[in-house]
Amino acid sequence: METRLAWYLVSSASFVIPLGVGQLLLPWLLAIYLEESATRIGLAQMIAQLPVVMLVLWGGWLGDRMDQRRLLIYLTGIMAIPPLVLAAIFYWGSVTYALVVVYSVIMGCFMAFVQPARDALVNRVAGQRIQQVVTITVGLQWGVQIIGFAIGSTADFVGPTILLLLISLFMGAAMLAVKLIPPLEEIENEATDGIVSQIKDGLRIAWSNLKIRTAMLQILALAVFFSGAYLVLLPVMIRELYGGGSLGLAGGFGFNLAGTVLATLVLMKTGRIRYPGRALIFGTLFSCSFLLTLTLPLVDWLFYLILFFWGAGGGLIVIMSRSIVQENAPDTHRARIMSIFSLAMMGGSPIGSLLMGLLIDQVGVHMATLFPVIGMIITALFLVVRLPLWGIQSASVN
């Protein structure tokens, strides 16, 4: 079990580093390299995330039908190819807005199948320590993603071609690490229905469980009001208010992610949380209180500090929501239910990105920051009043 977990964590680190590079490279290409408007940046971020929305439930179905380890070997290896192609186009030709969007869509298609398989594999390597291993896994992923941001921060100096080659190299390393995970016991899946029926079955189980439903709605709100809005708000703020290039973007993403790492370390030190729903409420109020200050003109260092604390609250929300879902999902449906979690987490982001881009162009970057604050607070109130968010208790805490 320990060997499996160790190689899973190595594969996760190798996979997340290039995601960090890519997460920085896309807004850099749009906001700095191509100098697009906030609306076009929001539109591109929305389109880039649509493949996950459209395909992730099928990814969950495939993750329940196939051995997740073998599936990840195939898909991660294939994901090394598109960055090589785009790197060649950069080297020998010119890159347009449309080409950047097409590349992002292709990578998103693969992510729709990779993420549910990775999420389901966590339970198979974790044993009974689900909340603890989820915390370690998420913390590691966020921690090494900062390495990806650091690599991406060199975009102004080395250009996109080198960064795309590094993305491809790390994807190949992730594939090799998955291959080194010892083979896992087969999980018997007796389902004989068609793909659509099995996906509906996963949706039915997720919705009928009040704990899972509550966590799903919370993560959907976070996707719309935090994740999606953040992908547009941050690069536009750094470009227009703080005069930053790739280093400024890397600093913004890095400080925000460092906050999530801090949240992870605190949770690891604290131990398992008996009432994760209450931790979700605290994370929401904590994040929103700091986010409100972005409506004001800030000096550079205070701006980045606010991003740090915003990330800490968001990290707490993600970890607790994911723990609730993974603890309550049955083994035979876990990949499908985690794909629904991914759908909620990633599916809301395109909406938030598009709305934030439109809002910034209409009311300005400072006033637009009220959008995520109001949205998250209203959601938290609804989940407390209408659903059992306050009373959710962890199944792994005695």
Image: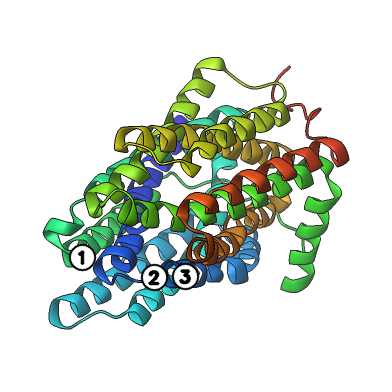
The residue that label 3 is drawn on is 39
Above or below, 321 against 81 in this view is: above
Whether residue 114 is visible: yes
The secondary structure type at the circle numbered 3 is helix
Query: Which SS class for mark 1?
Result: helix
Q: Which mark is residue 160?
A: 1
Question: Of the residues under marks 2 and 1, which one precedes in the sequence?
Answer: 2
Locate residue 386, reporting x and y percent.
87, 41
Residue type at mark 1 is: Pro
Q: For the C terminus, give its image quadrant.
A: top right
For the point 43% across and 42% down, the residue is 8
The answer to whether marks 3 and 2 mark residues whose Cβ atoms lie closer than 8 Å is yes
Which mark, by number, is residue 37? 2
Above/below status of 160 relative to 102? above
The one nearer the camera, 212 or 298, is 298
Q: Secondary structure at mark 2?
A: loop
Which of pointers 3 and 1 indicates the residue nearer the eye? 3
Give, as a three-letter code, the residue at label 3: Thr
Residue 235 - label:
none
Mark 2 vs mark 1: in front: 2
